[in-house]
Amino acid sequence: MKRALKVEIQGREIIKPSHPTPHHLRNLELSLLDQTNYSLYVCTCFLYKVNNNVKADQVSQRLKSSLSETLTKFYPFAGRVKDDFSIECNDEGVEFIDGRADGFLSEYLQNPDQKLLTEFQPFGGKGDPIAGKGPLLILQVTFFKCGGVAITTLSSHKLIDALSSSIFISCWAAVARGEFRKAVVPEFVAASIFPPSESFVPFPTHFSPAESNRFVFDASKLAQLQAEVASASVPRPSRVEALTALIWKCARTASRSNRGFARPSLLVQAVNLRSVVVPPLSENSVGNSIGFMPAQTSEKEMELQELVCKLRKAKDEFSNNGIQTLLETKSILNVSESTRDKFERDEIDFFSFTSMISFPVHEGADFGWGKPIHVTFPNYTTPNVVILVSTEDGAGIEAFVYLSPEDMPIFERSQELLSFATLNPPVQVNEKEKGSFASKSSL
């Protein structure tokens, strides 16, 4: 691995909404789903290849002014967690950091190792990932020597799930472009469907060092994988089901090889509840609106077709009674007490999968100099996490996999995995997507 790119911080500011939040909106009730999530910062980094005539100060000023305008709509993001039941929308603001990298964007694109970007977010891959009662949102813009730009967001999972973050980015980008009519109006109404409870059960989380790697699956390999995992029980598995089963199997194998013995495993898949609940939430509903579909295995080794069946059964069971169970148990993870006990005692392999394939990860993040050429999710503290996103052309899937430092070297050498995946290839840049900065008189 090459050295991490060094970043010199030019300044830190607190950006507040451009207009004060009205008194009647100064307190946001958390939903049950917000309550069950930790105040864990989730990191996303958008990388842009911009012409080298870009003026960093001009870009920073546009981002800050448009951010201030955007926060008038996303006013809870500028607030602080008050307690387990509410956000105080007090306009304390979000943190904005301006940095300059000592290298070129091409250094990362040729070798997309997340460790190169450790200084592109405030914690530098270290420190406390918990937001607590600090800012719900921290943003860092970093300029490369070549004119390339990185925008990194750290959002507190206490209020902001993956789709909420995507909605915010799309709105902020639209305002930065001066296209105010495309800036959505968010709705903070999840608590009306999932009211808070004094007996909520927190989502279980363990923090420990995590190693990351990226695996790219092109369309032809995904089709081949789907054909191989099809069975009489699941004749038409989805791309996500097929890919999840493959990664799950290879991660279990890595754990078994590292420990010298097999363990039972629990896999949870995040599911967007906005369109599932009755009545459905708006597509612009902001706040945690995810549940989890749990699938479990015993210690025995299982084939891909069997794992796909486990995943489909979990999906069917959640569709039938998942939301009702969530409301009754006050927990987003519906598993037995014995399974929870195994998790607490670290006697089970626990994997968390999130698919962002349907999210406008690239399309919605154009701040005026084109779509990002690459999006990544730096994570140094939470192993056994997998994030799936569409490739930039929409045809393939990128899997960002985070495992323990002991399991990752075994996992990334799996011949079964590599028969379908390309291990962390260089990021291909379409010159048509190379952006140029044009000033907006409206800002």
Image (cartoon, rainbow, N blue to C red):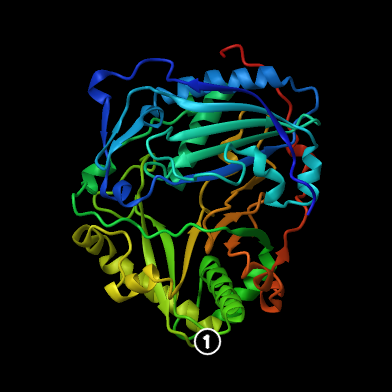
User: Vertically, is 434 above or below 238?
Assistant: above
- Residue at 77%, 47% in the rendered image: 109
The residue under the point 35% across, 57% down is: 203
What's the amino acid at mark 1? Glu
* Dot 1 crowding, Cα within 10 Å, few <14, some 14–19, many 20+: some
Question: Residue 19, position in %: x, y?
Answer: 39, 15
- Residue that appears at 23% across and 22% down: 24
Of 316 and 71, nearer the camera is: 71
Q: Position of residue 84 (x, y in %)?
A: 26, 43
* Residue 155 sits above or below residue 239 on the image: above
Residue 430: % across, % down: 77, 43
- Mark 1, secondary structure of its residue: loop
In the rendered view, tell whether residue 162 sits above or below residue 317: above
Extreme top residue here? 441
Quadrant, the C terminus: top right
Is residue 278 rendered to the left or right of residue 212? left
Residue 365 in sight here: yes
- Image coordinates of residue 342 in percent, x first then y, are 37, 74
Residue on which the image places disc 1: 301
